[in-house]
Amino acid sequence: MLRYLTSGESHGKCMLTILDGMPAGLFVDKSIIDIELARRMTGHGRGKRMKIESDRIKILSGLRKSKTIGSPIAMMINNIDQSIDELPVVLEPRPGHADLSGALKYDFRDIRNVLERASARETVSRVSIGAIAKILLAEFGIKIVSYITVIGNIEARVADLDISQIAKITEKSPVRCADPGASSLMCKEIDKAEEAGDTLGGIFEVMVHGVPPGLGSYTQWDKRIDGKLAKAIMSIHAVKGVSFGIGFEAARRRGSAVHDEIFYTKSKGFFRKANNAGGIEGGMTNGENIVIQAVMKPISTLRKPLASVNIKTKEKILATVERSDVCAVPAAGVIGEAAAAIEIANAMIEKFGGDSVKEMRRNYEGYMEQIKKF
């Protein structure tokens, strides 16, 4: 079973991660992790912090000659801005942020203690873990992409593209959108928000291709794969809602227009012509693409801040302004890929054995052969 801990503050010395449970024998190309970290920093609407940082991974343990050896993997990413001890006291909590609740919970008289750890800077650690999880999943032909469907009031038309086409188009889009026309309009919408001193949220989708049927279980509530994925995606900063397949649209349709009919041919085996379920039925993967949607609210830090209260004087005042983004939905999609990759990798290890990649592959191949003969 995979488990991990992250540590570090936004303006501290570094971000640290310990990943435990990765099978032995996996070749880890460090450059792949650096590429994922770079993808997290891109997107029209990102703030000045992204121009300062140049994230590079340092693997401190758990690998020998670039291969996992079954022991915990320790990773570190240095922060360029390490000014945490020199930064001023913060007394004006930002609406929509962890500031006030965190100060009340931990009895802080300086909100700086909250925002340093509550910052989305923490997600560099999860992207690093997700990169290793993606490397493992690639051994079994599993691919993951993300794409933006909504920013502000601009909605993209998601064409009927396969995962390779989506990846090719989104990597060239400044907002990671598979609809070029909507991509241009989204950039303009972000520019308008920046001029107004405001921020924008949106919706991103994560698609996982090549997942075998049977990951997860219906036997206990905490074994359901959609529950685990939803928890992972909801834990991403500013995400306020998660759905699968057609999501909330299912509430507006009758059952006959929601459930995916089952077909069979000798060459394909069991399959579905539609994927309204988003690849998950009864808490288990069904072999179709997993499709996850996530709603991200606008960033809480506004250049033209909202009303707040000074926690020391209790006087009405404007909220503090920190260095931040105008829109980070494209980056959230990349983080969503990592979150999904970790959970799918964990489910693969759970089902197929996780001591070594060789053992996993042998068990996986036997299971897939079993399915063919069903």
Image: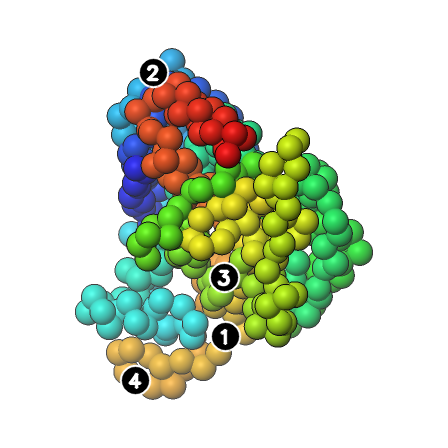
Q: Is residue 312 visible?
A: yes
Numbered disc 1: secondary structure: loop
Going from N to C along the chain, the mark reached first, 4 or 1, is 1
Q: Quadrant of residue 222?
A: bottom left
Real-space CA distance between mark 1 and mark 2, rounded to the nearest whole angstrom = 50 Å
Numbered disc 3: secondary structure: strand
Going from N to C along the chain, the mark reached first, 3 or 2, is 2
- The dot on residue 314 is 4
Q: Which residue is mark 3?
A: 242
Q: Quadrant of residue 117?
A: bottom left
Q: Nearer the viewer, mark 1 or mark 3?
A: 3
Real-space CA distance between mark 3 and mark 2, rounded to the nearest whole angstrom = 38 Å
Real-space CA distance between mark 4 and mark 1, rounded to the nearest whole angstrom = 17 Å
**Label 4–label 3 contact, CB within 8 A:** no
- The dot on residue 305 is 1
Q: Is residue 202 above or below residue 286?
A: below
Query: On the rendered structure, is 277 left or right of 154?
Result: left
Label 2 CA crowd tier, 10 Å (few <14, some 14–19, many 20+): few
Q: Nearer the viewer, mark 2 or mark 4?
A: 2
Pinpoint residue 79: horizontal percent, then vertical percent.
Answer: 40, 41
Q: What's the residue type where badge 3 is placed?
A: Val
How are the colours assigned in the image?
Answer: rainbow
Q: Which residue is mark 2?
A: 64
Residue placed at 30% from the left, 62% from the top? 114
Q: Is residue 305 above or below residue 169?
A: below
Going from N to C along the chain, the mark reached first, 2 or 4, is 2
Numbered disc 4: secondary structure: loop
Q: What's the residue type where badge 1 is placed?
A: Pro
Residue situated in front as seen by the camera: 37 or 28: 28
Q: What's the residue type where badge 2 is placed?
A: Arg
Label 3 CA crowd tier, 10 Å (few <14, some 14–19, many 20+): many
Query: On the rendered structure, is 363 left or right of 269?
Result: left
